[in-house]
Image (tube, rainbow, N blue to C red):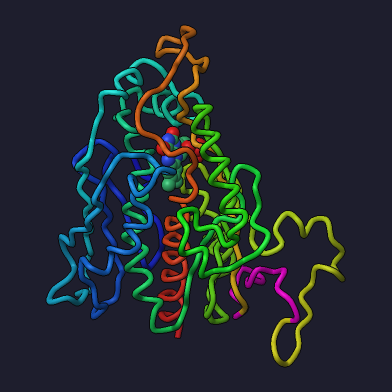
Amino acid sequence: MAGNSFGEVFRLTTFGESHGDGVGVVIDGCPPRIGLSPKDFVRDMARRRPGRNSIVTPRSEEDRVEILSGVFEGLSTGTPITLFIRNRNVDSRPYEILRQLFRPGHGDYTYFKKYGHFDFRGGGRYSARETAARVAAGVVAGKILEPSGVKVMAYTIELGGIRAGSIDLEFAEENPFYCPDPIAAERMERALAKAREDSDSLGGIAEVRVTGCPAGLGEPVFDKLDADLAKAVMSIGAVKGVEIGAGFEAARHKGSENNDPITPNGFQRNRAGGILGGISNGDEIILKAAVKPVPSIGQQQDTVDREGRPAKLKLTGRFDISPLPRIVPVLEAMVRIVLADHYLRSRTMK
Ligand SMILES: Cc1cc2nc3c(=O)[nH]c(=O)nc-3n(C[C@H](O)[C@H](O)[C@H](O)COP(=O)(O)O)c2cc1C
């Protein structure tokens, strides 16, 4: 079925399932002569990788990116780039129960209603494993943006109701939660330990900041930059809300409080989040994503089987306790992908 492709000029199609041979992405529209080697993917893939620490699923995947096409002698050729990440540490046994029972909060029920037949092992196509392909595509997008000095960084500003009170971006890179506040990071660790003890899970909020983005990215009217960013971010599993700039808060303010006054030296503040009229204004782009707690929990839950009969489900298997922090690199990748697409689109206009 359609729906696996994204972007206009920088266009990607992801493929694969959590417990199949692997996941991957075909990127069409990458310009030629972009330097690319398997090493370029190592850092970002490691940041998303499962099995990194005690917070995330113990499924241990190496997540090595194989370049199958579109690169010759270390440079992109302008032809489709295929990136493949093999599944190695697959254990489908705990998922056998999902042949019959639907996990509350997950996509099992809706995939069954829609397709009647689907690969439910490890969440199949709707598994977070698919996001490995997005992170790989995000590396290529980052390479396109690099010469313009565009930098994208995401971090966790809330987890299990605990909010970061300060923003230290260097510290955010150093701790397993990508939390920019050392005190909040400690509290988050305790909250996650408690959730694990209770066989429960936690949600949170991540913030993305883009620096160095020039004014002028975004198209009228359906392909506004904020509209495309919202779609890109909402397409990540577990994301339930997206805010640009002041977001929902803007609704509680007067125009005089919410407008960002313009001076010859730029904007006096940035409640717009760097986008006006769907076009980047040259200021920092600021986006927040609300992330729900992972649906797979070890507590007994009410559900039904494929015939609609009531049942109880108690899951075993390997799950994250929260989609944060693994979602942080995925957010960065999706934002880079949208910006690279709009950058290439605006270049073809000139
Ligand atoms: C990085 C990441 C990791 C995730 N880890 C898990 C997990 O271990 N267990 C789980 O049930 N859901 C996990 N999810 C969430 C599910 O993929 C998601 O809730 C599911 O596909 C249903 O989609 P929806 O929540 O958008 O409705 C994760 C999502 C992301 C983005």
Quarter of the figure with the N terminus: top left
Quadrant in the picture for residue 41: bottom left
Number of marks drawn: 0
Taking depth in this image into account, of 319 and 266 the one nearest to the observer is 319
What span is colored magenta in the figure? 268-282
Q: Residue at x 79, y 56 (%)?
A: 251
Residue that protrudes farthest toward the left in the picture: 73
Residue 16 visible in the picture: yes
Above or below for 38 versus 346: above
Above or below, 75 against 56 in this view is below
Q: Residue at x 48, y 63 (%)?
A: 335
Left or right for 3, reference 213: left
Could you tell me residue 198's position as x and y percent? 53, 27
Q: Position of residue 300 (x, y in %)?
A: 49, 17
Q: Is residue 244 magenta?
A: no
Give the farthest residue toward the bottom: 264
**Up/down of 88 relative to 92, above or below:** below
State the image coordinates of residue 344 (x, y, percent, origin top left). 40, 75
